[in-house]
Image (spheres, rainbow, N blue to C red):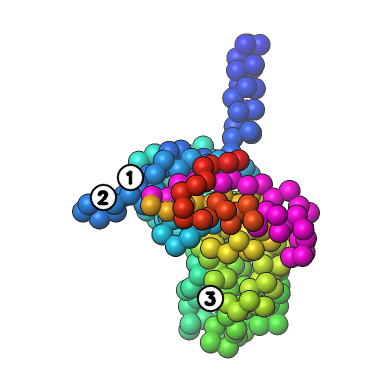
Amino acid sequence: MIERDAIAGAEGAATANRPAIEIAAVTQRFGAEAVPVLDGVSLDIAENEFVVLLGLSGCGKTTLLNIIAGLVPPSGGEVRVHGQRVTGPGGGKGMVFQQNALFPWLTALSNVAFAAVNRGHARAEAEKLAHELLALVGLAGAVDKYPFELSGGMQQRVAIARALALDPEILLMDEPFGALDELTRNEMQDELLRVWSARRKTVVFVTHSIWEGLMLADRVVVLAPNPGRIVLDQRIARARPRPRTDPGLIGLYEEIWRALRPDGRGERRG
């Protein structure tokens, strides 16, 4: 009995210490010529960690995000979420895209409530949750507005609220602020951090902006292209909110910039 309890305790400890996301030797090839897009990418992401995938166009960062989401199967390797192999969408994963894909015929409230209903909430309960989430993202006064009546930043706030309505354990974000002007983008970064602090999801965020990564991330993971591979895994040990004039961030910017240089000089550092 003691031995059995000890084994059960060890298994429980292993489960508790297991990363939220385990990416193991993932490769991806596309097309008839099997062009390599990702080559042996391995990465562990902890529970509630905010990780930014950063790289130049063509490095495979969106492909990797889609593999984590279960939208694309890898050619090799595997991804596990809380110990379970990813074989398709769902399973506690929510997605926010650069194009918010809101239903134009539904109000902000109805867009968010739609996701909650799909999760199994009754309509009244879904609308109550939608009100709470829209207030959380700063849109309590815009619940009855349609997407065309909202700015780009407001539309992305609705998209984030809709993703949260699914109550995902993991939030996957594919350049969600890439189409916004710089001022709105900075405001949305601050808003996302506020929401993340309140809800504490595990976040994987794709961007090509070094400063965006420095503002948001616990870790910035840099991918190099042809084929996609990790060349830098940089922890950002700076308290939030982070002023953009922080000399420490400027030094990290230079480190990440050197890793991004397409001259093949950098190897993975972490």
Cα separation between marks 2 and 3 = 31 Å
**Mark 2 touching mark 1, by CB under 8 A?**
yes
Cα separation between marks 1 and 3 = 31 Å
Task: Name the residue at the left extreme.
Answer: 32
* Secondary structure type for disc 3: loop
Residue 21 visible to the viewer: no
Instruction: Decide if residue 195 is on the left or right side of residue 84.
Output: right
Q: Residue at x 60, y 28 (%)?
A: 14
Q: Residue at x 51, y 37 (%)?
A: 83
Looking at the picture, which amino acid does disc 1 mark? Ser
Q: Earlier in the sequence, mark 2 or mark 3?
A: 2
Task: Name the residue at the bottom extreme.
Answer: 149
Q: Residue at x 71, y 67 (%)?
A: 190
Q: Which residue is mark 2?
A: 34
**Mark 2 touching mark 3, by CB under 8 A?**
no
Cα separation between marks 2 and 1 = 10 Å
